[in-house]
Image (cartoon, grey):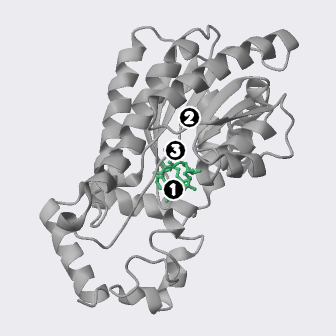
């Protein structure tokens, strides 16, 4: 009896290792010389995504508003591995100029042999989260317009302009668009109204596009919703008790020891975790729709908040205000 049990366990362990190991081996090969364009590539999740892509042997079009930061981040890579492009996703002319650069580079790269396909992936990662203590009515019109321009219209424009290059990729797995939304696009947190609204738009836009593209079976669309991730976007809005913190005077927790817990890796994931997930999605044959990327225990919390009755979530928010907000 115990012999059969042991054999069964051994077979299960073998199968488990096979399932874990073989796809990761395949992905290393799959990435080689494939071209992927990443927006917001100078920092945080975008930067880590490019690093992982380059490590796996892909060719990267790293695009960002901040050219100095791009040059600094990719100085160790030769031009046969990465092409740096200054592109503001809110400006149509910038995106069109970037498109021309990409077309030219793909042509040259194919001829010289350092790129072996058309554009394989588009990662729409550029985003902003200008969290300020201004109440809704105090917000300036430009401030509000800017967040939609970057987080929503930026993604829409990049996808529209670069789509013809993605569609021309014929091999299997098909090319893909990865849109970075947020857990805020699934659960509405207080003070994040516009950010949440833009991310809901990205979730919905991606789902619709994904079903639209299914008809041709050429381009996969995945929407990735990271939980709180330790990158400059978040360190600049709810900072670790420094003067930059928008809520420094209001939130009791900012001066307490609990803040360290909030910023600990157990709560706040590292950007490479999200980046690894993005790259795995690009090169896998799986066609996932919407995925929350976070620690398991955080995902459990998001699950309950998402399924909670709205009135119960309101009560929980009210209690949190009483506990953590001074006035
Ligand atoms: N960090 C988090 O907790 C978190 C959680 C969920 C989702 N996200 C999303 O992940 C994405 C990446 O954020 P991050 O955390 O890496 O932040 P980040 O600030 O480190 O990186 C954002 C990058 O986007 C670039 N950018 C901003 N505006 C741009 C524009 N108009 N044109 C081109 N590039 C522009 C910035 O220069 C920067 O390099 C964003 O869409 C963000 O909303 C982040």
The structure residue drawn at horizontal position 36% and vertical position 88%, both measured from the top left corner, is 249
Drawn side of residue 285 relative to residue 298, left or right: right
Drawn side of residue 38 relative to residue 68, left or right: left
Q: Which mark is residue 126?
A: 3
Q: Is mark 3 within 8 Å of ligand 1?
A: yes
Query: Nearer the N terminus, badge 2 or badge 1?
Result: 2
Estimate the x, y position of residue 4 in percent, counting from the top left.
70, 42
Drawn side of residue 50 relative to residue 122, left or right: right
| In front: label 3 or label 1 | 3
Q: Report how far apart the C-alphas of labels 3 and 2 lie in the structure.
A: 9 Å
Instruction: Name the residue nearer the viewer: 29 or 120.
Output: 120
The residue labelled by disc 2 is 123
* Quadrant in the picture for residue 315: bottom left
The residue labelled by disc 1 is 294
The structure residue drawn at horizontal position 58% and vertical position 16%, both measured from the top left corner, is 174
The structure residue drawn at horizontal position 58% and vertical position 34%, both measured from the top left corner, is 281
As helix, strand or loop, the secondary structure at mark 2 comes to strand
Estimate the x, y position of residue 179 in percent, counting from the top left.
47, 36
């Amino acid at each position: 009896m115990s012999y059969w049990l042991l054999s069964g366990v051994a077979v299960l362990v073998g199968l488990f290792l096979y399932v874990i190991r073989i796809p990761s081996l395949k992905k290393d090969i799959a990435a080689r010389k494939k071209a992927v364009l990443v927006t917001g590539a100078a920092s945080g999740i975008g930067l880590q995504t490019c690093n992982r892509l380059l490590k796996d042997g892909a060719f990267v079009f790293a695009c960002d508003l901040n050219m100095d930061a791009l040059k600094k981040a990719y100085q160790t890579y030769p031009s046969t591995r990465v092409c740096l492009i200054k592109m503001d996703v809110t400006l149509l002319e910038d995106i069109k100029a970037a498109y021309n650069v990409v077309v030219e580079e793909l042509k040259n790269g194919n001829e010289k042999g350092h790129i072996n396909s058309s554009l394989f992936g588009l990662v729409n990662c550029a985003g902003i989260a200008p969290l300020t203590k201004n109440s809704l009515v105090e917000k300036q019109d430009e401030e509000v317009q800017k967040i939609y321009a970057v987080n929503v219209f930026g993604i829409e424009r990049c996808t529209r302009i670069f789509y013809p290059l993605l569609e021309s990729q014929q091999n299997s797995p098909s090319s893909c668009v990865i849109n970075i939304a947020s857990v805020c696009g699934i659960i509405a947190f207080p003070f994040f109204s516009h950010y949440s609204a833009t991310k809901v738009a990205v979730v919905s836009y991606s789902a619709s596009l994904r079903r639209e593209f299914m008809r041709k079976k050429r381009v996969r669309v995945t929407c990735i919703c990271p939980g709180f991730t330790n990158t400059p976007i978040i360190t600049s809005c709810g900072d670790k008790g420094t003067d930059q913190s928008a809520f420094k005077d209001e939130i009791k927790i900012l001066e307490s020891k609990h803040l360290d817990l909030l910023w600990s890796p157990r709560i706040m994931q590292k950007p490479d975790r999200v980046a690894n997930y993005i790259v795995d999605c690009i090169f896998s044959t799986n066609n996932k729709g919407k995925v929350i990327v976070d620690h398991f225990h955080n995902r459990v919390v998001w699950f309950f908040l998402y399924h909670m009755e709205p009135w119960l979530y309101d009560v929980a928010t009210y209690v949190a205000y009483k506990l953590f907000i001074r006035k």
